[in-house]
Image (cartoon, rainbow, N blue to C red):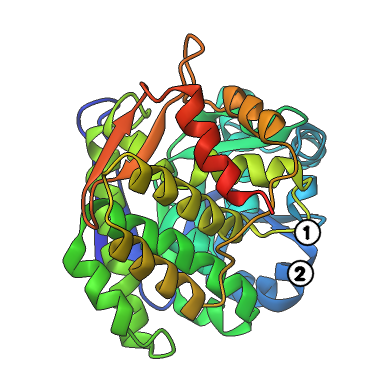
């Protein structure tokens, strides 16, 4: 199955997201695969057997969110220069969201921009991170604050890669799936509640619908000047959780799950979401072993970290909130007292 991406409103870029067994890939140019130590041991030889290129190189970096830095990008760039890649060369991201983000960012920088392809190996990257062209790295101030919008030439999603994925990593991807359903599609949410994620055909349908929803949004708003911001549901809170725990305690999807519950608590406080709807979402997250609670130690410190969020502008905080299940709203008029009242609910 193919989901087309067509960015007609901004850059007139087109590419396909292919959801199927990984095909034979032929490139009449130099190619460099960017991967990490974990994924390399599991999938690199399989991918190499699928590639026919003029020259093929491999750059392997350490595994982990803590390596998603400018220093790592510079290391990748240096290896590409050593391999004498040119402007017609191609990078292939083989890995999860961290690899995809850094490969895309590196591609945008190398000789002012070369092509890249996404081959995501985690559920989270298959349903979200590999689609839409967001690339970047973290720094001391927050997550993905340095980066670029840079679209891939293609995305190849093969669920066979997920067979080696740890259960915790798989669950982390489900957080990004539920995000799409709560924001845009009540029927999809109902489908997910009973979906069998262990069945390949069912899983491919889940991935397809998530990618379709994201494609619709990205096609309308490539650079997040409007509706694409809705895809950050759970992320404004979740990024603070990640920052406070130094990106080591929670996987990204786990932090998003916590952020979803915090955003839901705010939505209930504002009368946008009913308590029973919040309970439905929480029960789904718990069913898939995702965290739904977090202990805030310092409410003021947590609140102040909101202002490092990319969506904050002119000292006005922007929150993506559910409007029932299947609807959404973007609010930048929530006062400090209301926000801190909700945050205090997460203080033990």
Q: Quadrant of the C terminus?
A: bottom right
Instruction: Please provide percent x and percent y for residue 105.
Output: 60, 35
Q: Earlier in the sequence, mark 2 or mark 1?
A: 2
Q: Nearer the viewer, residue 320 or 180?
A: 320
Q: Secondary structure at mark 2?
A: helix
- Residue at left 63%, top 70%? 48
Residue, x 27% and y 34% (percent of image)? 227
Residue identified by numbered label 1: 63
The circle on residue 248 is none
Mark 2 touching mark 1, by CB under 8 A? Answer: yes
List x then y, in percent, for residue 177. Answer: 39, 63
Q: Can you see residue 305?
A: yes
Residue 38 - label? 2
Q: Is residue 1 visible?
A: no
**CA neighbours of label 2 inside 10 A, class few (<14), some (14 to 19), many (20+):** some
| Marks 2/1: CA–CA distance | 6 Å
Corner quadrant of residue 278: bottom left
Residue in the picture at 29% in, 60% down: 181
Q: Which of the 4 quarters of the picture holds residue 212? A: bottom left
Q: Residue furthest top?
A: 314
Rendered location of residue 344, percent (x, y): 59, 42
Location of the N terminus by quadrant is bottom left
């Amino acid at each position: 199955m193919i989901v087309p991406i067509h960015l007609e409103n901004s850059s007139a870029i087109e590419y396909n997201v292919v959801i199927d067994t990984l095909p034979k890939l032929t490139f009449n140019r130099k190619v460099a695969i960017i991967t990490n130590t974990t994924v390399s041991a599991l999938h690199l030889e399989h991918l190499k057997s699928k590639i026919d290129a003029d020259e093929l190189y491999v750059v392997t970096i350490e595994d982990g969110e803590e390596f998603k830095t400018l220093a790592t990008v510079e290391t990748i760039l240096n290896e590409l220069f050593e391999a004498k890649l040119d402007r017609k060369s191609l990078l292939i991201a083989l890995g999860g969201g961290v690899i995809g983000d850094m490969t895309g960012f590196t591609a945008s920088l190398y000789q002012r921009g070369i092509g890249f392809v996404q081959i995501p190996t985690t559920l989270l990257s298959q349903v979200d991170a590999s689609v839409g062209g967001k690339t970047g790295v973290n720094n001391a101030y927050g997550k993905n604050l340095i980066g670029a919008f840079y679209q891939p030439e293609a995305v190849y999603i093969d669920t066979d890669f997920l067979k080696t994925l740890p259960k915790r990593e798989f669950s982390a991807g489900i957080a990004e799936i539920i995000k799409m359903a709560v924001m845009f599609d009540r029927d999809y949410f109902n489908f997910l509640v009973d979906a069998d994620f262990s069945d390949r055909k069912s899983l491919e349908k889940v991935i397809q619908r998530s990618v379709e929803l994201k494609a619709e949004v990205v096609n309308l708003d490539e650079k997040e000047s409007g509706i694409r911001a809705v895809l950050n549901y759970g992320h404004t809170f979740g990024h603070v959780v990640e920052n406070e725990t130094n990106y080591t305690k929670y996987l990204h999807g786990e932090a998003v799950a916590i952020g979803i519950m915090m955003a839901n608590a705010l939505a209930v406080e504002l009368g946008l979401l009913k308590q029973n709807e919040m309970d439905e979402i929480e029960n789904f997250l718990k069913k898939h072993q995702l965290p739904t609670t977090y202990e805030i130690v310092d409410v003021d410190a947590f609140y102040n970290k909101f202002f490092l969020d990319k969506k904050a502008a002119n000292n006005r905080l922007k929150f993506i909130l559910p409007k029932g299940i299947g609807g959404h709203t973007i609010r930048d008029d929530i006062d400090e007292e209301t926000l801190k009242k909700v945050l205090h609910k997460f203080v033990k």
